[in-house]
Image (cartoon, rainbow, N blue to C red):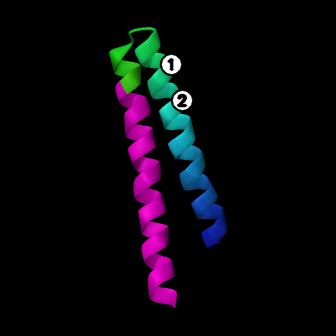
């Protein structure tokens, strides 16, 4: 299950970064903020999974 969560975290990071960069290119600040939030959520999900892995070992 952890591998699925890690993949989901990476997908959120990539999607958020893509949305943020495209929104900046077309000057949509609200959409850029949503993309940044999605990217941060992916980073936090990844950090949670790394923390869980460290306790398993």
Asked if 5 appears above or below 9 in the picture, the reply is below
Residue drawn where x is 54% and y is 29% of the image: 18
User: Are the residues at dot 2 and dot 1 in contact (C-beta closer than 8 Å)?
Assistant: yes
* Relative image position of residue 20 (x, y in whole percent): 44, 26
Q: For the point 45% across and 12% down, which residue is it?
A: 25
Q: Quarter-wise, where is residue 1 in the image?
A: bottom right
Q: Is residue 14 magenta?
A: no
Q: Position of residue 33 (x, y in %)?
A: 35, 28
47 lies above or below 31: below
Q: Looking at the image, which residue is at 39% across and 34% down?
A: 36
> x and y percent of residue 43 in the render?
43, 53
Locate residue 26: give its quadrant: top left
Question: How many badges with numbers are in the image?
Answer: 2
Magenta span main SS? helix
Q: Residue furthest top?
A: 26
Badge 1 crowding class, 10 Å Cα cut-off, few under 14, some 14 to 19, many 20 or more, is: some
Give how far across and how far down residue 34 sits, in percent.
39, 30
User: Mark 1 highlights which residue?
Assistant: 22
Point out the stretch of residues depicted in magenta. 33-57
* Badge 2: residue crowd in 10 Å (few <14, some 14–19, many ≥20): some
Which residue in the protein does label 2 denote? Answer: 18
Q: Is residue 54 above or below residue 12?
A: below
Asked whether, in this view, residue 1 is left or right of residue 42, the answer is right
Kind of element beneath mark 1: helix
Query: Can residue 44 be found in the magenta stretch?
Result: yes
- Label 2 vs label 1: CA separation? 6 Å
Q: Residue at x 38, y 9 (%)?
A: 27
């Amino acid at each position: 299950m952890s591998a699925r969560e890690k993949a989901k975290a990476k997908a959120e990071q990539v999607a958020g970064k893509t949305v943020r960069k495209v929104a900046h290119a077309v000057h949509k600040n609200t959409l850029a903020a949503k993309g940044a939030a999605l990217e941060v959520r992916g980073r936090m999900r990844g950090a949670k999974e790394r923390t869980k892995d460290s306790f398993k070992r």
